[in-house]
Image: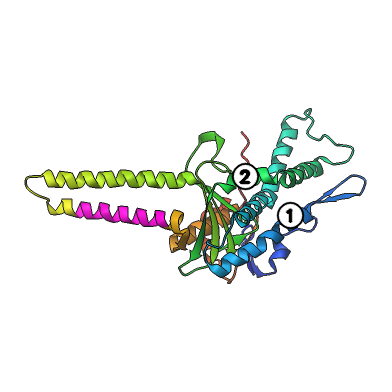
Amino acid sequence: MHIFDKKTGREFYSNPRNVMGESDYNVVALKDSYYIDFELRFTHIENLAKPVFEDIIKAQNLSILTPETTATICCFFAIQHARSKASRERMSDLGNELRRRFPDVKTNDLPEFFSDQEYDKFIFLKFATEKLADLAAPLVSKVMVLLKLNCAGQIYISDNPLLLHNQQEFGPYGNIGLGVPGIEIYHPISPDLVLGLLCPTIGLRLKKAQAEASKSLNDLHLAAFRNPQGSIQAQLDHLKEVEEDLQRARHYYSMLFEKRLVPISKENLLFLNSLQLQSAYRFVGARRKDFAFAKQAIREKPHWKDFPRFQFG
């Protein structure tokens, strides 16, 4: 795979495991030279999910999914969200900030066994594995969609590949989380396919917008009908424009929530690749050596070189 280092701007070819993984990443060191290894628990979920993704790639649609395989995907997404380098670093930042601000507060319940940093890591991994069902629960109610590349260009994948996006705003409480209303979740599963999970409230909002647009269209028709002078050309042009917008909205809803298969247009691709670049801890990968968009984006938005961290007031 071709790799782009967003911190240095360097491009190179490598096995993804060499740059998007770390040795002993899921291993916790104890003070007595013993270790606790969580890797097998994550590998088990990956092994269950792999054939499900292979079936989707072969079928090119989601009709082959069962409740069991859907749950497997939800567990995989939850693990991906919890185990990423970016998530780990954010939690480490939080622990360090607590210790800096409140040096007398006890943040390590087992100081005889763990250093502060290893204890943070232990608690994080223990929670991710023992509470997997709780982490995955908000995903089960989401609407799963398959996005298929339908334009020139290539889909990026990063060392933090699970993307979370939300068009709704909730003020200081933030709008990103697996269970937050309006959340959109995306993960590439092949060079041409992205699997998405959409909050059902998105469909409800689209339906409501369609109903309002349909009512507005009817009102325009009634107004034109009641006009004793008849419809002038400007009114007819406006009616046609509104009808076309409504038709596009209905088609978009059908692709997302009925067919659950959406072509990735040029605009969609820029959106997804922008999210991958922003969320990446450091490395972005692609099938071909073409990172022109990534380089331009980093030049225009140099703060993307770092991954999104917690902001402490």
For the stretch drawn in magenta, the main secondary structure is helix
Residue 92 x/y as whole percent: 72, 43
Quadrant, the N terminus: bottom right
Q: Does the magenta stretch include residue 223?
A: no
Q: Name the residue under label 1.
A: 42
Quote the CA–CA distance across marks 1 and 2.
Answer: 17 Å
Q: In this view, does 91 lie above or below 160?
A: above
Q: Is residue 242 magenta?
A: yes
Part of the protein shown in magenta: 237-254
Amino acid marked by disc 1: Phe
Picture quadrant of residue 39: bottom right
Q: Nearer the viewer, residue 304 or 46?
A: 46
Q: Name the residue under label 2.
A: 137
Residue 200 x/y as whole percent: 49, 46
Q: In this view, does 277 lie above or below 115?
A: below
The residue at 74%/44% (across/down) is: 130
Quadrant, the C terminus: top right
Amino acid marked by disc 2: Ala
Labels 1 and 2 touching (C-beta < 8 A) = no
The residue tagged with tag 2: helix, strand or loop? helix
Q: Can residue 295 be seen in this view?
A: no
Q: Nearer the viewer, residue 87 or 259?
A: 259
